[in-house]
């Protein structure tokens, strides 16, 4: 009997800790099906992360132990989105991203996303004002914010829908909820 094999490939420690917390909420029999890794690149841009994920996918296929799903989990600092999304689709990769950094996702747990941050540092500074306990890479953000997830998902959906003009299809800027749905479907299947 074939069991699922999933990879969540993260661009940094913040994403890694968040995904690891979601993995630990899975039933014991499913936790081993999910591998959560962080890239070994110092400063990882989404293109480098995607190319590294494709190498991992090819290696798993050569090893005859392929992944059923590969998720890239990253902040999206000014990436040319249509080209990136085309590359992800062509390589059967999923993406969970935010416009600049994961802290923007955390902000949605507290307030509507109304500010466009220029730098990651400004987003982190804003988050610390509304969530003073936040310490980058030192707090279990998923566990701490879990009760506020429905509001964050609703706000992300609202932001994504505001991008649609005259019924044109726009690229969403928050797809982290898709990763949450994926983990939820695993929980329900287990």
Image (cartoon, rainbow, N blue to C red):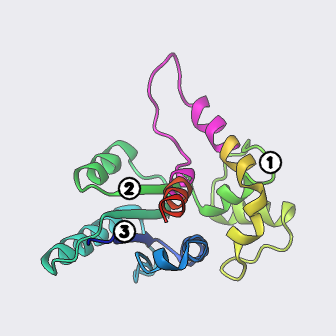
Nearer to us in this view, 112 or 148 = 148
Image-based side of 147 in relation to 70, left or right = right
The residue carrying mark 1 is: 111
- The residue at the far left in this view is 62
Q: Check disc 2 and report its element: helix, strand or loop.
A: strand
- Dot 3 or dot 2, earlier in sequence: 3
Q: Is residue 76 among what the camera can see? A: no
Q: Do residues under tags 3 and 2 come within 8 Å of each other at their CB atoms?
A: no
- Dot 1 or dot 2, earlier in sequence: 2
Image-based side of 8 in relation to 153, left or right = left
For the N terminus, the image quarter is: bottom left
x, y percent for residue 51: 28, 67
- Measure the C-alpha gap from mark 1 to mark 2: 27 Å
178 drawn magenta? yes
- Measure the C-alpha gap from mark 1 to mark 3: 30 Å
Q: Against 74, is 108 above or below?
A: above
Q: Do residues under tags 1 and 2 come within 8 Å of each other at their CB atoms?
A: no
Q: Report the residue at 86% width, 70% height from top.
A: 132
Count neighbours of disc 2 (C-alpha within 10 A) and say few if under 14, some if 14 to 19, many if 20 or more.
some
Image-based side of 108 in relation to 179, left or right = right
Q: Check disc 1 and report its element: helix, strand or loop.
A: loop
x, y percent for residue 8: 43, 70
Q: Check disc 3 and report its element: helix, strand or loop.
A: helix
- Measure the C-alpha gap from mark 3 to mark 2: 12 Å
The residues colored magenta run 155-179
The residue carrying mark 3 is: 49
Q: Against 49, is 87 above or below?
A: above
Which of the numbered marks, if any, corresponds to residue 94?
2
Q: Report the residue at 58% width, 70% height from top.
A: 22
x, y percent for residue 44: 43, 72
- Please state which of the two labelled residues, at mark 1 or mark 2, is closer to the viewer: 2
């Amino acid at each position: 009997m074939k069991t699922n094999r999933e990879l969540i490939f993260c661009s940094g420690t913040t994403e890694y800790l968040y995904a690891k917390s979601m993995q630990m909420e899975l039933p014991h029999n499913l936790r081993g099906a999910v591998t959560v890794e962080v890239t070994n690149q110092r400063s990882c841009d989404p293109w480098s992360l995607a190319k590294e994920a494709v190498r991992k996918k090819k290696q798993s296929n050569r090893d005859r132990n392929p992944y059923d799903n590969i998720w890239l989990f990253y902040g999206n600092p000014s990436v040319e989105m249509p080209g990136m999304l085309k590359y992800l689709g062509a390589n059967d990769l999923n993406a969970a991203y935010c416009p600049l950094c994961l802290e923007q996702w955390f902000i949605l747990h507290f307030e509507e996303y109304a500010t466009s941050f220029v730098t990651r540092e400004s987003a982190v500074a804003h988050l610390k004002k509304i969530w003073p306990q936040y310490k980058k890479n030192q707090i279990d953000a998923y566990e701490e914010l879990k009760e506020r997830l429905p509001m964050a998902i609703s706000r992300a959906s609202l932001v994504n829908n505001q991008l649609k003009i005259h019924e044109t299809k726009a690229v969403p800027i928050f797809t982290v909820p898709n990763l949450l749905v994926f983990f939820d479907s695993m929980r329900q299947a287990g």
